[in-house]
Image (spheres, grey):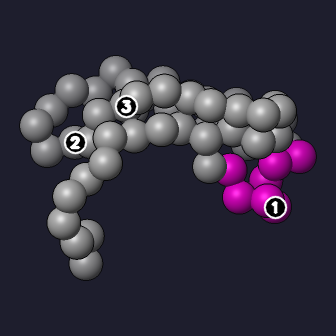
């Protein structure tokens, strides 16, 4: 999800979408899977990823 401070920047939105495309192209047992991209508006975009069990700490 884009942080509020970057939501107004078209460059940041494009970079976020490019990162989503990169994640979508990856396939490996140790990388969470890309599910989809969702948005309500151009400035409210999120990338949905597979739920990872366990603790990341």
The first of marks 1 and 3 along the sequence is 1
In the image, what residue occupies the spot 22% across and 42% down? 31
Q: Is residue 26 magenta?
A: no
Tag 1's secondary structure? Answer: helix
Could you tell me if residue 19 is visible in this image?
no
Q: Is residue 4 magenta?
A: yes
Q: Quadrant of residue 30?
A: top left
The first of marks 2 and 1 along the sequence is 1
Measure the alpha-carbon separation of dots 2 and 1.
28 Å
**Residue extending furthest toward the right:** 8
Above or below — where is 8 with respect to 23? below
Q: Quadrant of residue 23?
A: top left
Task: Count the numbered circles shown.
Answer: 3
Residue with the mark numbered 2: 31
Could you tell me if residue 6 is visible in this image?
yes
Nearer the observer, 42 or 54:
54
Where does the C terminus fall, quadrant-wise?
Answer: bottom left
Which numbered circle lies on residue 38?
none
- Is residue 31 found left or right of 37 in the rendered image? left
Q: Position of residue 11 (x, y in %)?
A: 77, 37
Residue with the mark numbered 1: 5
**Residue extending furthest toward the left:** 29
Q: Where is residue 40 in the image (x, y as percent from the top left)?
A: 78, 34
In the image, what residue occupies the spot 31% across and 48% down? 51
Instruction: Kindly check if marks 1 and 3 are in contact, taking CB atoms under 8 A apart as contact.
Output: no
Tag 3's secondary structure? Answer: strand
Which residues make up the magenta segment? 2-8
Measure the alpha-carbon separation of dots 1 and 3.
25 Å
Residue with the mark numbered 3: 34
- Is residue 45 found left or right of 22 in the rendered image? right
């Amino acid at each position: 999800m884009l942080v509020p401070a970057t939501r107004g920047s078209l460059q940041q939105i494009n970079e976020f979408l490019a990162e989503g495309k990169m994640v979508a192209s990856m396939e490996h047992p140790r990388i969470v899977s890309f599910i989809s991209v969702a948005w309500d508006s151009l400035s409210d975009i999120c990338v949905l990823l597979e739920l990872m069990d366990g603790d990341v700490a």
